[in-house]
Amino acid sequence: MTTIETATPAAAPKPSRRRGRLIAAGLVILLAAAGTAYWLTRDTDTGAYDPDAPYLDASRPVAERVDDLLGRMTLDEKIGQMTQAERREVTGGDVTAYALGSLLSGGGSVPSDNTPQGWADMYDGFQTEALATRLRIPMIYGVDAVHGHNNVHGATIFPHNIGLGATRDPQLVRRIGEAVATEVTATGLDWDFAPCLCVARDARWGRTYESFGEDPEIASSMTTIVTGLQGEKLGGPNSVLATAKHYVGDGGTVDGKDQGDARIPEEELRKIHLPPFQAAVKAGVGSVMVSFSSFNGEKLHGHRYLITEVLKGELGFTGFVVSDWNAIDQLDGVRDAFTPAEVSTAINAGIDMVMVPERWREFIAVLRDEVNAGNVPMERIDDANRRILAKKFELGMFEHPMADRAQFDKVGSAAHRELARQAVRQSQVLLKNSGVLPLKPKTGKVFVAGRSADDIGNQSGGWTLTWQGSSGPITDGTTILQGVKEAVEPGGTVTYSADGTGVDKSYDVAIAVIGETPYAEYEGDRPDGVKLDKVDLDTLATLRKAGVPVVVVLVSGRPVDVSAQLPQVQGLVAAWLPGTEGAGVADVLFGAYAPTGKLPMSWPATAAQEPVNTGDEKTPLFPYGFGLTY
Ligand code: GLC
């Protein structure tokens, strides 16, 4: 509050007329000062909550509601809307005290009761605090549901995007979006940091499996998932805000380095990496997340041209732009704390909401100082708030702020699992078949080996229950081995041995389920290329010694260098990261579903060949689009 100093007259005036003039002059000064104080800090409106305020009238146009609400907000309330904190980093009362506009769960950040009820209770706890703020603006809660509601134990885990790219089926992917939105809504949440529309150009990149493939056409066609997640328009019963990420060029960095530098001409950025975002904007995506990576040495998080002029201007994106995890802290190349320059650069570049999981209090203070210092114009603050508030109004959050508790049973439902199994079937790519496939169902002796044959964690990959994912029985579902047993027994026999011990000539076939163990982001970078490790190579050698036909099923997030092994196996299937419904792999192996998948990535002849993409001068082992059937 500004204290107002009044002038003290030098000499004692004659009482009467002179006193009157002085009092009048004093009043004028007081009024002028009060008026100035109002304009200087007109955002300090401390009006009480008005239940009849236009912004609360759902019959009014969203733009009107935004204008009315914005006009009531203080600077601190506006900065609060632009701040996203991680659930573990706030304590009771913080959401109210700081008027936080958003919270998130980082990968694996789950309530102690990791059930739909536990999530809904957590969400409602935070929302109750948000509704205790002066203007009762609901907070929006974001989560990475990137292949199902993958933090939640028992949720349906769908194939990662690389497998969905192999299906070439946009309508299937839309239906997956609907199912994911239902499971996210069933736990109370309203914002999904998906889809990833990155175009992976180098399989050494740890996030290749989050991509639909090397050709922007696939990712653009799969933006049907935006409609699946959001509905035809936001605000439906199972509508969550989708996020096109990571804008832009994260899949085109030198050597596939995560958070690296895409050193390419703007023409190539526009031809390869921008189209999926154009398609997502056309599909009405409500938010866009900026990439950690750089474009020709300039961090995307400070790139005003690409964020404001291209995304918001040229593409006409009217939703809001969210930063990635502490990414603004990388702008000066030093990961210390937010400098004022980093904060003002990021906001002025066009970022509307900032994901500052831990140091959100510091961020709020720095941004307030930057606004008061004139380094961030109030127009930019107001634009960011308009974008954020418009989505909250469109989602119906002011009318229905609390968790919908009527759909707990939809999480991991049989219908969603059947959809996931169909997606697994359609994502299998048959790369080699010397006649050994399809296997004979219900009869014969089948030997199954490989560390990923009976492992839900391996077949789901990263972003499953935890950020990095992990091997083992981490959630409910069926392993590939269980699927094989369903197809063969009774009548036939199935023997399982992870390393192949016990295999002999009496078996009709040996299935080796091998490949990668879970990872996420930069933990998955393989600068020397993606190869089979010793465990898998030893398993293969054991099976080959037995002299029985070997079918390799590759559980991996990307093409793996198998050139040396190819001549010694009779069948090769790319299963990608199928998720919880491993039986879908067996459906293809035993012919219940003939393989239809097509490679979404060129398959390198050697690990050293990366990057290899359709149209370049290199000759891959299997070309983009390759896939056999029976
Ligand atoms: C991560 C990822 C991003 C994710 C975000 C929140 O670092 O880059 O894809 O949405 O943080 O978990």
Image: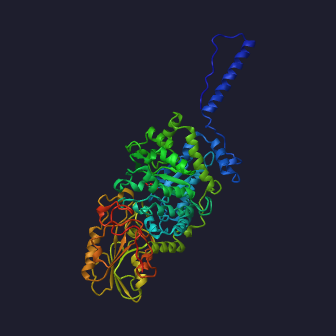
Residue 212 at least partly seen: yes
x and y, in percent, of residue 346 in the image: 47, 43
Residue 142 at least partly seen: no
Q: Name the residue furthest left.
A: 545
Say which residue appears at 67% left-offset and 44% top-offset: 68
Say which residue appears at 45% left-offset and 63% top-offset: 212
Q: Please give left or right for residue 165 compared with residue 19 in the image.
A: left
Q: Please give left or right for residue 359 compared with residue 9 in the image.
A: left
x and y, in percent, of residue 234 in the image: 61, 58
Say which residue appears at 48% left-offset and 47% top-offset: 306
When the figure is inspected, residue 469 is found, relative to residue 1, above or below; the finding is: below
When the figure is inspected, residue 389 is found, relative to residue 236, above or below; the finding is: above
Between 158 and 551, the one nearer to me in the picture:
551
Say how many tags the image has.
0
Quarter of image, ligand 1:
bottom left
x and y, in percent, of residue 367 in the image: 50, 40
Between 78 and 167, the one nearer to me in the picture:
167
The quadrant holding residue 19 is top right
When the figure is inspected, residue 489 is found, relative to residue 298, above or below; the finding is: below
Give the quarter of the figure containing the N terminus: top right
The quadrant holding residue 42 is top right
Say which residue appears at 56% left-offset and 55% top-offset: 286
x and y, in percent, of residue 114 in the image: 49, 63
Give the quarter of the figure containing the C terminus: bottom left
The quadrant holding residue 452 is bottom left
Between 233 and 115, the one nearer to me in the picture:
233
Q: Which color scheme did the rendering employ for the protein?
A: rainbow
